[in-house]
Image: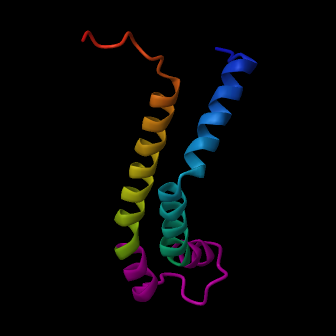
Amino acid sequence: MIDSPVGALSKERAVRDYLRSTLVRIGLILLIVGSGPMMFIYVAAGLGLWPDPNPNPIGPALLAFFTFWPSILCILAGVVRAWWRQRSAHRTPGPPPPS
């Protein structure tokens, strides 16, 4: 299935609208800052760059534990808000209510 260029442009615009959302940005920052250190340690250990081949990073694991779900909730709330804004902006006004 080949997407048309028009469809690709609208998808890019939709992603850009989602990334403009403050809640999505906060959620992504929380996800990267919270889970990044633990992931770095595990990847470095897997590649043999960390002194311990089987690390148990308590501090980074607690940081990831306390920031993961709040970051996911922020991302979801931001996506819903951006979707709602897009939906209301593209909606055509209906006939006026009878008086």
Give above or below for 96 relative to 28. Answer: above
Image vertical order of residue 99 relative to residue 5, above or below = above
Question: To which quarter of the image does residue 75 belong?
Answer: bottom left
Q: Residue furthest front?
A: 99
- Which residue is at 48% across, 17% downward? 92
Quarter of the image with the N terminus in it: top right
Q: Is residue 55 magenta?
A: yes
Q: Residue at coordinates 36% horizontally, 57% vertically from top-left? A: 73
In the image, taking residue 11 as reference, residue 52 lies left or right, namely: left
Q: Is 34 colored magenta in this rendering?
A: no
Instruction: Quarter of the image for the C terminus: give it.
Output: top left
Q: Is residue 56 above or below residue 71?
A: below
Q: Is 66 or 10 nearer to us in this picture? A: 10
At x 29% / y 13%, what residue is drawn?
97
Percent x, y of residue 48: 65, 79
Image location (x, y in percent) of residue 63: 42, 80
Quick one: 22 or 76, which is closer to the camera? 22
- Image spot of residue 41 (x, y percent): 56, 79
**What range of the chain is rendered magenta?**
39-65
The residue that appears at 48% across and 74% down in the rendered structure is 34
Counting from the top left corner in percent of width and height, residue 55 is at 48, 84
Q: Is residue 86 left or right of residue 68?
A: right
Vertical relation: 78 (above or below) 90: below
